[in-house]
Image (cartoon, rainbow, N blue to C red):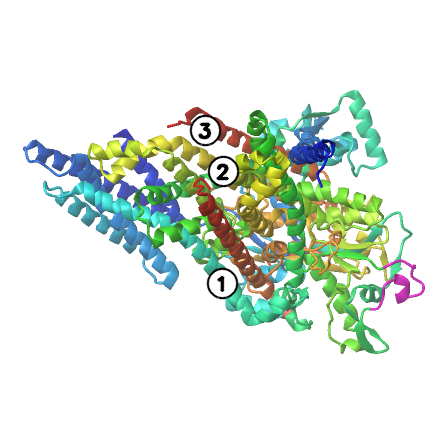
């Protein structure tokens, strides 16, 4: 008899597990759900870990979906199954906010948390380099204007671009097309420069050369560092945070005469930098109790302030006044209007 | 023209030398494969063993008023940057829970941060000269030391190398394997029983057989695409959960279990079946009461090997989102989780170099588990193997 | 009410009904038999039949409606569903207990049901294959609606950059068209596979020859499981080994010869993959060589051939179909291998014959497309499925050819254990 009962119970468990899979199971909701930019991901996951460790709530779940994908998921509606926060490495667009409103997501608070700079770095054994944004563009674009005509990029050495630059081969390790850093590089360098050039007809041009001078380095950043320290001719493109991690072996070039320092970036002087945001769905504040505790922790001075923990891992802090403003807005849960954008 | 004996024997010698050469060459090939194995384990051990030790630091804790807001205030400023964040962030909470601590002092060993750890182990680190001098002095006084790394076995993932551990991933592996086994074992055994004991020899049976062999050779990543498109997108199974991971791996393990079970069933001699039929058993009774119990050791062995294979699989799990950042140690079927090989993959991609040894340490643990499982299978086979 | 609570309720009540069915059925059968009537089956068998009629239809109804709800989006209130399926269970219970009659063949009825359950289990493996096929084909078709199949197969430029922009919500900011020419990806895949085979086939085959023809029995019993350890190491571990240890080694080695190697060169993942595949080739070849009939060896030795000549001219040619079959399976494994290349090979689609350069593979792109910062509907994401489809077709063909080869070998020498 015992055997029968046992096998019966076993069968039921198996069937129950299978049916459970089919039906899907509701999530417990003291767990915050976060989606969005992979650039903000390391900072946000640091805060979520801290949040899980010091509060009694479970660690929020973060998925790195990209800024655009995150905003789409965020704006799909209100209620169970939709994320509470989306991180973004750019500001939300008015069209996106309108779509949010159409789906019932009407009360969104925007929080600016800091900036992120992209550096163009080389082995620190080399002499420092001072580039203009345009020179950088000419080194990596697939097609460049020569005498007003667009031709395949002819530059093999830096000195080909400008005689004042060193006689070194152009060899750049950069992020793959699936990474957020690449997205930022295309936006802040490629588009910014090409829109100013007549040959492109005033439109942004983002195609990167594929003749071997630009090397898609993959996600394994350690290998880039190794490569840069051995092949001292090469440059690497990566986020400012990664430069901080490897400050002893790498040094960043000056861009338009500005060195990539936290001060220059947060003041907006360093050209390849962008602001980082996250967006909070206020309509979930009731149903997800820890939501604003998390937000408060994120904007606290110990996190995003100067010398805060996030700056240790590469976030570039906002000026004092802007940080105050961000906290103010969080405290009031100010709703973002289309007119603000 | 005839050859002299000398010429012939010289020729013979040449031929035998050639034969001997093949023997040495083939022996060398086996030796080379063995050498790879030795090199591989030596490399992993040398990289991974340091992960089982972690720098700790003895500090004087002064629970003052400031420490209720900012944990760092409880520490001597000289060492505050050398202590792991994971400890100091807990201080305000500790004081809130136990207000009587306020105003007291305490001396205890706490986790040092990863840079101190890497410095002590002689790896690359980011301590400045003053900090290095401090660590050197503390080490001389016996206030900094490498101790057994319990954190590695008791905590989940962390952004800070010194605090990251494998327990969350290990639990994820256990939950995922439970799902895999609960699905693959009964279905696999039933399929094998059908094919060996019930199926008529017709087209359908042949198709099923060819299909199973083919399934065993399909790249594992394609199972991940199936999991993504059917389990997650269509059936709405929660992404990143052990449930979806286990279901995906179950389909992958199925052919292994089926093939092993069929071999085990085939090795049960027909005389057993004849005897059972002879006393009036129905087909199912023959299988259930006589053939299956005799084949069970073989089935168990095959299932354990299949399980070990599934346990080391990563590619399909990446596709169904099980490469997630999981700091919480919890056993769950439906919430996001990660598994040991996925944790290894995540750590391998961390920019912080202190994670290299964590990766190798995780690998050692995974290998130990797999070797244990496979050894169990071998012992099981040895112990219960019956020659008929 | 939550779904999991409903489910627990459903299972609980069903379990209870099943138990009731079991005891009612058995009690009734025992009563009938105690009355002296001869019955076709044992009381326990009637009891089990009652359990089957109770649980079977109810689970079927529950499962079917859950499936309908998902598939057709039909709205069935869960509470009605629960009540409905439990009513079916109760009805089944009544029928099952009623069927406890002396002239009812409960054992045969159970046998029939079990047979169908077994058939159902066996069909799951077929469903799996179709599941893989359909899940890939539907998404791949959506991809081919956006980009032509011909360009995909013959194009030499893989540049999905612009579709990424679209996903990032910046499509309107102007960008050149995305290009999805898969030739560089397949070139990279085949390059790495070729390197792996260059390592695995000679070493694996020679090791098999040694184990089968030369080695003393003790070496053989020790060497075989040791080699199997290589096959049991997870691929993610091999990937780490290739990226952290082997790749820098290759770069240094190339430097000694004055060559310039990338850290993501194709040699490191190729060699490591080869090491992984050695036991695969050696154990299959070992089996094949062992099944070459001894009469052939004896004949050859009797004619005065040396051991080496016998192996080279008699044993290997006889075993060739089996060895080729093993190699084809190994190739199919190497093509589909993911973790080693994801961790050690490059990301750059690079059409080159120099294995020291970085190049990417099909599986790397699949992983990159499905894990990066992409939106779910972009062409780059869908391209993963198109690549998966080609991978599926290629490995399927290799597997089938391999099966045919081994079958020929088996028929020729009447070997049954392969």
Kindly tell me whether residue B155 is visible in this rendering: no
Q: Which residue has dot 1 on it?
A: C137
Q: Secondary structure at mark 1?
A: helix
Q: Which span of residues is magenta-colored?
A: A154-169
Q: Are marks 2 and 1 in contact (CB under 8 Å)?
A: no
Q: Position of residue B272 (x, y in %)?
A: 29, 31
Q: Position of residue A242 (x, y in %)?
A: 75, 49
Which residue occupies 44% across, 24% down? B383
Q: Which residue has dot 2 on it?
A: C293
Kindly tell me whether residue B284 is visible in this rendering: yes
Q: Tell which subunit mark 3 falls on.
A: B
Q: Position of residue C296 (x, y in %)?
A: 52, 38
Q: Quadrant of residue B67?
A: top right
Q: Secondary structure at mark 3?
A: helix
Along the polypeptide, which appears first: circle 2 or circle 1? 1
In space, the residues marked 3 and 2 are separated at their CA atoms by 28 Å
Using residue A259 as the reference point, say whether residue A30 is left or right of it: left
Within-10-Å neighbours for mark 2: few <14, some 14–19, many 20+ = some
Q: Position of residue A134 (x, y in %)?
A: 83, 67
Nearer to me, B346 or B151: B346
| Marking on residue B381 | 3
User: For the view shown, which residue lies furthest in the top direction?
Assistant: B141
User: For the view shown, which residue lies furthest in the right direction?
Assistant: A164
């Amino acid at each position: 008899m015992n055997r029968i009962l046992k096998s019966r119970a076993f069968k039921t468990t198996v069937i129950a597990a299978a049916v459970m899979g089919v039906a899907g199971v509701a999530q417990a909701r003291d767990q915050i759900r976060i989606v969005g930019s992979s650039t903000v991901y390391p900072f946000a996951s640091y805060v979520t870990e801290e949040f899980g460790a010091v509060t009694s709530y479970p660690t929020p779940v973060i998925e790195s979906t990209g800024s655009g994908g995150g905003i789409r998921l965020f704006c799909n509606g209100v209620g169970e199954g939709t994320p509470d926060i989306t991180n973004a490495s750019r500001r939300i667009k008015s069209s996106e906010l309108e779509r949010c409103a159409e789906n019932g997501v009407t009360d969104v608070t925007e929080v600016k948390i800091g900036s992120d700079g992209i550096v163009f770095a080389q082995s620190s054994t080399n002499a420092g380099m001072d580039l203009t944004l345009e020179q950088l563009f000419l080194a990596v674009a697939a097609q460049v204007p020569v005498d007003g005509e667009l031709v395949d990029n002819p530059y093999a050495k830096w000195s080909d671009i400008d005689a004042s630059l060193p006689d070194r081969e152009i060899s750049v390790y950069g992020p793959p097309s699936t990474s957020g850093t690449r997205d930022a590089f295309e936006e802040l360098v490629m588009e910014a420069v090409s829109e100013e050039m007549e040959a492109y007809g005033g439109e942004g041009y983002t195609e990167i050369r594929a003749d071997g001078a630009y090397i898609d380095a993959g996600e394994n950043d350690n290998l880039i560092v190794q490569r840069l320290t051995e092949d001292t001719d090469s440059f690497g493109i990566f986020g400012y945070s990664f430069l901080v991690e490897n400050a002893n072996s790498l040094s960043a070039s000056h861009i338009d005469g500005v060195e990539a320092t936290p001060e220059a970036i947060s003041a907006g002087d360093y050209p390849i930098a962008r602001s980082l945001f996250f967006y909070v769905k206020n309509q979930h504040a009731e149903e997800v109790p820890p939501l604003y505790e998390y937000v408060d922790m994120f904007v606290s001075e110990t996190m995003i302030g100067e010398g805060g923990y996030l700056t240790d891992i590469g976030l570039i802090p906002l000026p004092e006044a802007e940080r105050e403003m961000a906290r103010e807005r969080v405290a009031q849960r100010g709703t973002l209007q289309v007119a603000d954008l | 023209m005839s050859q002299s004996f000398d010429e012939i024997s010289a020729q013979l010698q040449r031929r035998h030398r050639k034969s001997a050469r093949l023997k040495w060459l083939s022996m060398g090939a086996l030796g080379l494969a063995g050498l790879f194995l030795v090199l591989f384990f030596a490399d992993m051990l040398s990289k991974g063993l340091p992960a089982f030790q972690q720098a700790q630091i003895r500090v004087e804790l002064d629970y003052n008023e400031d420490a209720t807001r900012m944990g760092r205030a409880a520490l001597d400023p000289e060492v505050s940057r050398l202590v792991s964040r994971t400890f100091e962030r807990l201080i305000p909470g500790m004081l809130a829970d136990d207000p009587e601590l306020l105003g007291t002092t305490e001396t205890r060993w706490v986790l040092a941060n990863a840079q101190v750890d890497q410095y002590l182990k002689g790896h690359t680190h980011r301590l400045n000269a003053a900090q290095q001098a401090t660590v050197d002095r503390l080490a001389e006084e016996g206030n900094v030391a490498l101790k057994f790394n319990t954190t590695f076995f008791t905590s989940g993932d962390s952004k800070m190398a010194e605090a990251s551990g494998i327990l969350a991933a290990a639990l994820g592996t256990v939950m995922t394997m439970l799902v895999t086994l609960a699905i693959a074992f009964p279905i696999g055994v039933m399929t094998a029983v059908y094919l060996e004991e019930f199926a008529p020899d017709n087209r359908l049976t042949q198709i099923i057989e060819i299909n199973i062999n083919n399934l065993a050779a399909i790249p594992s990543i394609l199972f991940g695409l199936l999991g993504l498109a059917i389990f997650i997108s269509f059936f709405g199974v929660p992404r990143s959960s052990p449930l979806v991971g286990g279901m995906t791996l179950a389909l992958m393990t199925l052919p292994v279990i089926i093939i092993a079970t069929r071999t085990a069933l085939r090795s049960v001699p027909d005389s057993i079946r004849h005897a059972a039929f002879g006393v009036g058993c129905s087909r199912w009774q023959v299988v259930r009461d006589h053939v299956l119990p005799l084949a069970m050791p073989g089935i168990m062995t095959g299932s354990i090997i299949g399980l070990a294979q599934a346990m080391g699989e990563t590619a399909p799990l990446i596709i169904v989102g099980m490469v997630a950042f999981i700091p919480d140690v919890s056993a769950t079927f439906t919430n996001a989780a990660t598994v040991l090989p996925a944790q290894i993959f995540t750590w391998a991609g961390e920019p912080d170099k202190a994670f290299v040894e964590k990766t190798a340490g995780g690998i050692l643990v995974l290998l130990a588990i797999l070797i244990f499982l496979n050894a169990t299978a071998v012992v099981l086979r040895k112990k219960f193997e019956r020659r008929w | 009410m939550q779904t999991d609570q409903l489910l627990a309720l459903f299972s609980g009540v069903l379990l209870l009904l099943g138990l009731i069915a079991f005891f009612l059925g058995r009690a009734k059968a025992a009563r009938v038999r105690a009355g002296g009537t001869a019955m076709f089956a044992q009381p326990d068998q009637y009891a089990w039949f009652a359990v089957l009629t109770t649980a079977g239809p109810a689970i079927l109804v529950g499962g079917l409606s859950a499936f309908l709800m998902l598939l057709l989006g039909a709205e069935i209130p869960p509470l009605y569903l629960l009540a409905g399926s439990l009513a079916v269970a109760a009805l089944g219970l009544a029928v099952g207990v009623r069927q406890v009659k002396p002239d009812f063949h409960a054992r045969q009825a159970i046998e029939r049901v079990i047979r169908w359950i077994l058939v159902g289990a066996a069909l799951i493996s077929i469903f799996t294959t179709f599941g893989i096929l359909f899940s890939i084909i539907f998404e791949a078709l959506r991809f081919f609606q956006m980009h032509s199949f011909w360009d995909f197969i013959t194009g030499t430029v893989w540049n999905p950059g612009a579709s990424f922009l679209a996903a990032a919500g910046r499509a309107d900011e102007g960008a050149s068209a995305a290009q999805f020419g898969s030739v560089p990806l397949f070139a990279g895949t085949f390059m790495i596979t070729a390197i792996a085979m260059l390592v695995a086939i000679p070493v694996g085959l020679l090791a098999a020859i040694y184990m089968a023809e030369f080695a003393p029995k003790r070496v053989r019993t020790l060497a075989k499981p040791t080699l199997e350890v290589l096959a049991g190491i997870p691929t993610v571990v091999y990937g780490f080994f290739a990226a952290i240890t082997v790749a820098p080694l290759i770069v240094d080695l190339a430097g000694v010869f004055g060559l310039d190697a990338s850290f993501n060169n194709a040699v490191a993942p190729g060699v490591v993959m080869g090491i992984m595949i050695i036991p695969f080739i050696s154990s299959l070849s070992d089996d094949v060589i062992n099944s070459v009939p001894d009469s052939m060896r004896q004949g050859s030795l009797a004619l005065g051939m040396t051991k080496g000549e016998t192996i080279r001219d008699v044993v290997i040619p006889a075993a060739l179909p089996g060895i080729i079959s093993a190699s084809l399976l190994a190739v199919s494994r190497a093509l589909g291998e993911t973790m080693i290349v994801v961790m050690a090979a490059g990301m750059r689609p690079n059409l080159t014959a120099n294995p020291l350069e970085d190049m990417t593979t099909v599986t790397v792109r699949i992983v990159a497309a499905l894990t990066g910062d992409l939106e779910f509907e972009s062409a780059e994401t869908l391209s993963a499925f198109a690549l998966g489809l080609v991978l599926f077709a290629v490995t399927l063909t290799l597997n089938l050819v391999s099966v045919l080869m081994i079958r020929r070998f088996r028929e020729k020498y009447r070997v049954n254990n392969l």
